[in-house]
Image: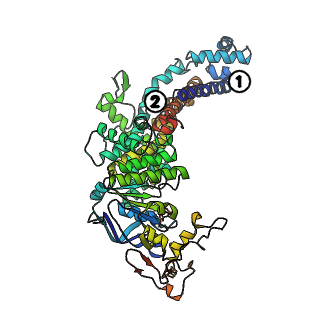
Amino acid sequence: MTVFVIRRLMQSILVLAATAVIVFIGVYAIGDPAEMLIAPDATAAERAQVEASLGLDKPLPVQFLAFLGNALHGDLGRSFVFNQPSISLILERLPATLELALVAILIALVLGIPLGLIAGLKPRSVTDETIMTGSILGFSLPNFWQGMMLVMIFSVWLGWLPSSGRGPTGHIFGIETSFASWEGIRHLILPAINLALFKLALVIRLTRTGVRETMPLDFVKFARAKGLTERRVVLVHVLKTIMIPLVTVIGMEIGSLIAFGVVTETIFAWPGIGKLLIDSIMRLDRPVVVAYLLVVVSLFILLNFAVDVLYSILDPRIRLGRN
Amino acid sequence: MTPVLVVDNLETRFGSGAGLVRAVDGVSFSIDRGEILGLVGESGSGKSITGFSILGLIEPPGRVAGGRILFQGEDLVGLPSERLRRLRGKKIAMIFQDPMMTLNPVLSIETQMVEAVLAHDAVSWKEARERARDTLGLVGIPSPEERLKAYPHQFSGGMRQRVAIAIALLHRPDLIIADEPTTALDVTIQSQILFEVRRLATEFGMALIWISHDLGVVASLADRIAVMYAGRIVETGFTDDVLDRPAHPYTRGLMDALPANAARGEKLRPIPGLSPSPLARPGGCAFRTRCFAATEICQQEPVLQGGDHSFRCHHPLPAGVAA
Ligand SMILES: Nc1ncnc2c1ncn2[C@@H]1O[C@H](COP(=O)(O)OP(=O)(O)OP(=O)(O)O)[C@@H](O)[C@H]1O
Ligand code: SF4
Ligand SMILES: [Mg+2]
């Protein structure tokens, strides 16, 4: 197990290093770094000064080391718009995005697993058909359209929930969160549901397929032959078996929720990194885009690593190895 | 002596219309306390389905369509599922064919044994664990205390089957249905397990239904034999009677196919032809397409005749033709 963790950690560091090289090539080697890092409206004098300070006259490997050194110190350039280190801009917005993604994935799991179980246990029943039709809608309707419908119904017609912005935040255990006040929670509901819908459909399908595949297996029949209650057979024997593939997929989906929450954050004016990215692209604020890229890749790597560890904890065949 | 189990004209079917499969087609037998009954027949003859029917483990589209299963005087057909659950594992236990598939790969041996105890007895986890450990020792698993913590993949096939047997023995049931428990194992392990199960059955006075396609295995083990063909019992009686004086050509065919019965250097004589498809069984005697003694009259269903040693055949073999 320890060997496994160390091995995966080394792999993660390798991937991160590879990403750094790619970003470096993209920003410094292929493009003109001066273009990337200097505001478009800078004067010629300013430009020359920056180019010298960036050491662009030096050979490429030296430039790469300098870039790496800066990146390791958290220096990925300053935002033209906010005149503030781009990395700190990203990190400032990150909690809002993380909160939204985590709440969305929780909604998807808490609703999706039971619904998938119910559908899978009674295949082709009316309940199953209803649940599966719902999940097809969740899959096929575009995310922005679902978001607009949510706003239309719950904000405009019913007037129950706010449709824009993050509400007041407070601190719980030192973490900035919307859960500190009811108003904060109210602002969170619609965007979280919007972000959750697609994943909910996915969790339902994965769970249902898992149940359908596991139920006919011999060990389920044997569990019944032991006289276990149907409840225990389903909730322990079947669920534990399907949790393993589910965790893997969902773990990776959290990454995509963070990276691609852009649409939801834009619709609901949610002040996270997705909205920051869109704003920065519109304003040609390149240092922020670069910082976003590195932060999101790091998050993916981190999640990937966490998922692998969790997977191996859940599956004794990996945790303990063969005889 | 009153029998532990009386199966009376059992019918178990799958599907309907043109796809109707009469997997078990009017099977009757009984078994006394402490007795070993060998159920023999080719693949697809309905042996496993007979076993699953007794435990109430037939799942849709299958169903028990008729007959009675009297266990200690109580008819199990149509019994409420909770009442049936209380018998399963407690009074009637089953061991499955493939030890590699019987145990849940993601749960420890401890969990899978303790839950089987707790399904029927209100004892503490600790007590249940002690019973599990002692039973593992009973079936010949070395250092049971440590092995409890292990997972199925850490055991060999033979050891897994011993674990499954231990699970079946946890409640000292009155009846054990062993569905080809040694078929998947190599010969040495097979005879060890045969010996072990026989010893335990005698020791605890349990009735044992031993299912096998191998007449040789059953001959060495069973007090009585029932030979199944195409969902029916075609010959049954005390093992010695049946083997000394087989009346049904199918039984005779099974005996001729045994390596031990072929004279040295002589070829084995397998039964010609294949088992009929369960969807298109010939009317009358289902064996007539492969039978050397078949005549016109065999197109009519033969009735069961004889007393302790009974058979279904229009032209029973004369005594003394056994090899
Ligand atoms: N789920 C099912 N759907 C349709 N038919 C089935 C199903 N399960 C079993 N059957 C039919 O029931 C018949 C008896 O099957 P069973 O498993 O009892 O055979 P068996 O004697 O145990 O054979 P084996 O030695 O291969 O285990 C088979 O011919 C099969 O076609
Ligand atoms: S009834 Fe006829 S076909 Fe069937 S086993 Fe007897 S002789 Fe053969
Ligand atoms: Mg079978």
The image quadrant of residue B80 is bottom left
Residue at screen point 48% across, 38% down: A316
Q: Is residue A101 visible?
A: yes
Q: Nearer the viewer, residue B206 or A205?
A: B206
Helix, strand or loop for disc 1: helix
Placement of A219 over or under B299, stated as above or below: above
**Vertical comparison of B276 with A147: above or below:** below
Residue A232: image location, x then y, percent? 34, 48
Q: Is residue B4 left or right of residue A223?
A: left
Task: Please tell me which residue lies in front, B83 or A132.
Answer: B83
- Going by the numbered disc 1, the residue's amino acid type is Ala
**Chain ID of residue with mark 2:** A
Q: Identify the residue shown where x is 69% and y is 13%.
A: A55
- Category of crowding for the residue at label 2, using alpha-carbon neighbours closer than 10 angstroms: few (below 14), some (14–19), many (at least 20): many
Q: Give the answer, above or below, for where A179 lies relative to B2.
A: above
Q: Examine the rendered structure and indicate whether residue B69 appears above or below residue B285.
A: above
Q: Earlier in the sequence, mark 2 or mark 1?
A: 1
Disc 2 designates what residue? A272
What residue is shown at x 40% (from left), y 57% (from top)? A128
Label 2 sits on what residue type?
A: Gly
In the picture of the structure, the residue carrying the numbered disc 1 is A29
Q: Give the camera-side residue of A273 and B206.
A: B206
Figure disc tally: 2
**x and y percentages locating residue A302 in the rendered image:** 52, 29
* Label 2 residue SS: loop
